[in-house]
Amino acid sequence: MYTAGVAAPRAGRAGSRCLGVAHQHHSDLSRYAGQRIAVVEAGQSALESAALLHEAGAHIEVLVREQGVRWGSVRRLGRPWLQRLAQPASPLGTGWTLGAVCRAPGWVRLLPAAARLLLFRRALGPWGGWWLRDRVEDVVPVRTSCRVTRAEASGSTARVELTGPGGSESLAVDHVLAATGYRLDIDALCFLAPALRRGIVRVPGSKTPHLTRTFQTSVPGLYLAGSLAAPVFGPMMRFVAGTEYAVARVACDAARWVVAPRAWTGLCGMGGSRAAGGWPA
């Protein structure tokens, strides 16, 4: 079994020097003390990186395409029943859409591929955790309603071209931290042999694998969970909240290769038989 891997998309153009970086490439932020850093976007990774960089002594400006930063709220227990009816709670937040996809990932898998991909892209937008808000809001400068159109090296600095309601302008910084999200791509799993990756059937319109109800790919015995399963089973698979659903089904199906059929049937409460060579029929 393997866990999911993702590929970070490129954001605009960059020069040959490593002035533009992706947020997952750095863990020790003390080296950026005193430096000017533009953090692109307003998801959890961007906002948390901005807070940590600010606390490490860097001069930060967060660049956000939207009109404002969205923050999560503390989960309230014992809400009035009308509120619970209007906005059901789920591990990912409140609302009927999130409640439905979190309660029934198996039903999400039965939707047409185009509908699942639309749900994956739009069910959750960029937002920050409620516990992070006090470390960012009115602490770190945030510029909203602006879009990065170009980024390139200019001497020892990076020059970022922006467009917004007031027109275009240029911002000079020492580094650009791109926290712009990921494009899911099965080919980013470089530890899988190229021939094996080519044998995996993809979800139409994407580079993610088509999965059975037990998270098995078209390659017998190869299971994929995590973010790569989200276009099939819904956005909950991107988070820890989705592990219980995924692990239970992967474990029951994979048990066929390591235990006797009778023991496996008792463990999972479902029947099954092995085809010749040990793979499922």
Image (cartoon, rainbow, N blue to C red):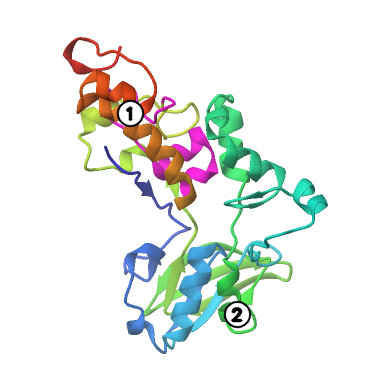
Q: Which residues are magenta?
A: 212-238
**Image: 96 above or below 74:** above
Indicate left or right for 105 with 143 as reference: left
Residue 221 visible in the current orientation: no
Question: Does 167 appear above or below 226?
Answer: below
Q: Measuring 57% from the left and 31% from the top, which residue is drawn there?
A: 108
Percent coordinates x, y for residue 281 in the rendering: 30, 11
| Magenta-span inclusion, residue 176 | no
| Residue at the image point whose x is 33% and y is 24% from the top | 266
Report the amino acid beneath label 1: Leu
Up-down relation of residue 76 to residue 115 (above or below): below
Q: Amino acid at mark 2?
A: Asp
x, y percentage for residue 4? 35, 44
Q: Which sits earlier in the primary sequence, circle 2 or circle 1?
A: 2
Q: Within 10 Å of the Cα at label 2, are there few (<14), some (14-19), or many (20+) other Cα atoms?
A: few
Magenta stretch contains residue 218:
yes
Circle 2: element type: helix
Q: Is residue 126 left or right of residue 201?
A: right
Look at mark 2 in the image and give the residue it sits on. Answer: 134
